[in-house]
Image (spheres, grey):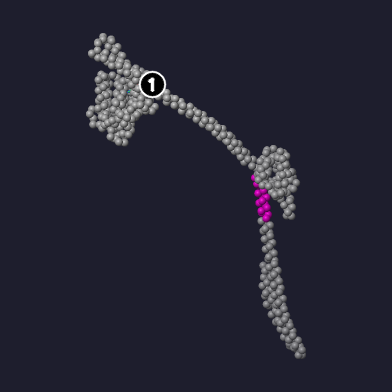
């Protein structure tokens, strides 16, 4: 590509070149011309003429040309700079216009695609634009509604309240209204609860040209809030109701409590009366029974007048029944004493093996057929308990072992000590106890219903008294039994000389309390 001598890009360089070369060329041209003129010189005035030409055309001329070209180059540079600046300004303006258009497009996209309804109204309330959100919320398409008054989406009752006018006043006064909760109506007649924001729109001259409205559908949220409010109200009502019920129940409970306390006091009095009565009756029964027993023993003894055999048998029966009655009376008396807190314990240190031998001796003297296997002269430490009460317990357990075994069956008695207690066990090979009864036989008046011919005479007091007596002395009683094979009753009492155990059985301790 050939570039012209005056192409704009290197024009300043060329002008610079011309500014240097042209004056020199003019000077040489003048000099050459004047040299030729010198050869045709005729007069002295011609010489002066040549010298003047040389001065003017050879000096002033080139200098003037140099300045002129320089001036032109400067003007061209200035024009160039102005052109570049203008170009830059135009490009910046173009960029700003593009950015503004992009923003406008974005804004338009946001408005038209927003899930909220965005509409513009003119000063007369006529709808000018209607976005997709508005279509979705109210069901009208833009074509159906643009050009119509926005009253179309205001429910008649809301309109009747003068909301349209009130809203215009508010918007005119402040320029906008924000987060105003109201109702609108959709094309299908559905009520829509909306959060409304309305703003005045101005043109470039600052004149009001209409307003924009953004409506957010908050129907679901409001319904949920209303449901929660309703639930809260119901809950409060229920709480109030329950509180009232609770207060009533508490009052009732207090009343019942008072009644119970009174009944308890009455019962306690009755109990005391009962105990006194039982104790009195038992005492009254015991004295004549002792006399009857003594008399019968006398009648049956060898020294007494002798009756025939049938009389003796009858007297024997009377004696046995009287002994049973005495035992029952004694049992009842014991129970009533224990429960009235009148049983007095007198603990002491004694030898358990000696006590076992004594009790067995009593039974043997009564002529029972059972074989007793028992410890003899064992080197056991002394026990700390009430000797008479312990004898009663042992007597009772052996009595039961005899009662609930077949005649002549062996009864095994053992005593063993650990570092705290002496444990006595009484084992028999009798009828045994059903497993579901084992926990109950120590209860007052509880008897095992056998339902067969092994039913034995008794009152269900013996084991109850044993338990109360053993526990009152800081001990324990229990049983292992296999039905049809036999039972082993064990009771443990504290060792004498065990200082930490002795306070459990204090001297003259009273056993009391209801069970
Ligand atoms: P009682 O013998 O007067 O009925 P107890 O309180 O002494 O009252 O005994 C309660 C129940 O325990 C008895 O009815 C009896 O069935 C059962 N029982 C007690 N000792 C034995 C035993 N050695 N063998 C089997 N059953 C027993």
Image height check: is 169 above or below 20? Answer: above
Give percent across and percent down for residue 270: 42, 23
| The one of 120 and 200 positioned closer to us in this rendering | 200
Give percent across and percent down for residue 335: 36, 24
Q: Which residues are magenta?
A: 100-115
Q: Determine if residue 456 is in view.
A: no
Q: Is residue 22 magenta?
A: no
Q: Secondary structure at mark 1?
A: helix
Give percent across and percent down for residue 389: 31, 26
Label 1 neighbour load within 10 Å: few <14, some 14-19, many 20+: some
Location of residue 30 by image quarter:
bottom right
**Residue sitting at 36 percent across and 25 percent down?**
337
Image quarter (top left, top right, bottom left or bottom right) of the N terminus:
bottom right
Q: Which residue is mark 1?
A: 277
User: Main SS of the magenta segment?
Assistant: helix
Location of residue 325 by image quarter:
top left
Image height check: is 450 above or below 83? Answer: above
């Amino acid at each position: 590509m050939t570039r012209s001598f005056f192409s704009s890009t290197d024009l300043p360089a060329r002008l610079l070149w011309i500014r240097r070369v042209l004056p020199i060329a003019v000077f040489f041209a003048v000099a050459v011309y004047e040299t030729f003129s010198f050869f045709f010189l005729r007069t002295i005035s011609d010489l002066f003429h040549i010298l003047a030409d040389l001065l003017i055309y050879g000096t002033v001329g080139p200098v003037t040309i140099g300045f002129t070209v320089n001036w032109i180059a400067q003007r061209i540079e200035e024009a160039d700079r102005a052109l570049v600046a203008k170009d830059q300004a135009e490009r910046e303006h173009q960029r700003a216009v593009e950015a503004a258009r992009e923003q406008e497009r974005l804004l338009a996209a946001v408005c038209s695609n927003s899930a909220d309804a965005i509409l513009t109204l003119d000063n007369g309330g006529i709808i000018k634009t209607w976005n997709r959100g508005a279509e979705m919320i109210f069901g009208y398409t833009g074509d159906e509604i643009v050009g119509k008054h926005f009253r179309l989406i205001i429910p008649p009752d809301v309109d009747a309240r003068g909301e349209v006018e009130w809203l215009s006043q508010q918007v005119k006064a402040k320029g906008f209204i924000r987060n105003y909760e109201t109702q609108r109506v959709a094309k299908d007649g559905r009520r829509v609860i909306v959060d409304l924001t309305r703003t005045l729109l101005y043109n470039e001259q600052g004149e009001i040209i209409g307003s924009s409205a953004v409506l957010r559908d908050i129907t679901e949220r409001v319904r949920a809030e209303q449901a929660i409010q309703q639930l809260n109200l119901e809950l409060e009502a229920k709480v109030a109701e329950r509180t009232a019920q609770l207060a009533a129940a508490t009052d009732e409970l207090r009343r019942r409590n008072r009644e119970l306390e009174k009944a308890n006091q009455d019962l306690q009095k009755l109990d005391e009366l009962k105990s006194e009565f039982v104790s009195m009756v038992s005492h009254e029964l015991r004295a004549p029974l002792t006399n009857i027993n003594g008399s019968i023993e006398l009648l049956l003894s060898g020294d007494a007048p002798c009756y025939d055999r049938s009389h003796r048998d009858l007297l024997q029966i009377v004696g046995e029944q009287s002994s049973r009655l005495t035992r029952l009376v004694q049992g009842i008396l014991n129970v009533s004493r224990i429960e009235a807190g009148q049983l007095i314990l007198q603990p002491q240190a004694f030898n358990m093996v000696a006590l076992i031998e004594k009790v067995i001796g009593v039974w043997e003297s009564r002529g029972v057929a059972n074989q007793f296997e028992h410890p003899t002269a064992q080197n056991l430490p002394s026990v700390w308990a009430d000797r008479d009460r312990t004898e009663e317990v042992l007597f009772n357990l052996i009595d039961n072992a005899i009662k609930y075994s077949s005649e002549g069956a062996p009864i095994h008695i053992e005593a063993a000590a650990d570092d705290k207690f002496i444990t006595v066990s009484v084992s028999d090979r009798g009828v045994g106890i059903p497993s579901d009864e084992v926990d109950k036989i120590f209860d007052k008046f509880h008897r095992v219903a056998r339902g067969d011919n092994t039913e034995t005479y008794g009152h269900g007091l013996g084991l109850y008294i044993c338990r109360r007596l053993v526990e009152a002395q800081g001990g324990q009683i229990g049983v292992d039994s296999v039905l049809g094979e036999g039972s082993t009753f064990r009771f443990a009492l504290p060792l004498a000389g065990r200082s930490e155990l002795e306070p459990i059985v204090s001297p003259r301790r009273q056993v009391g309390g209801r069970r």
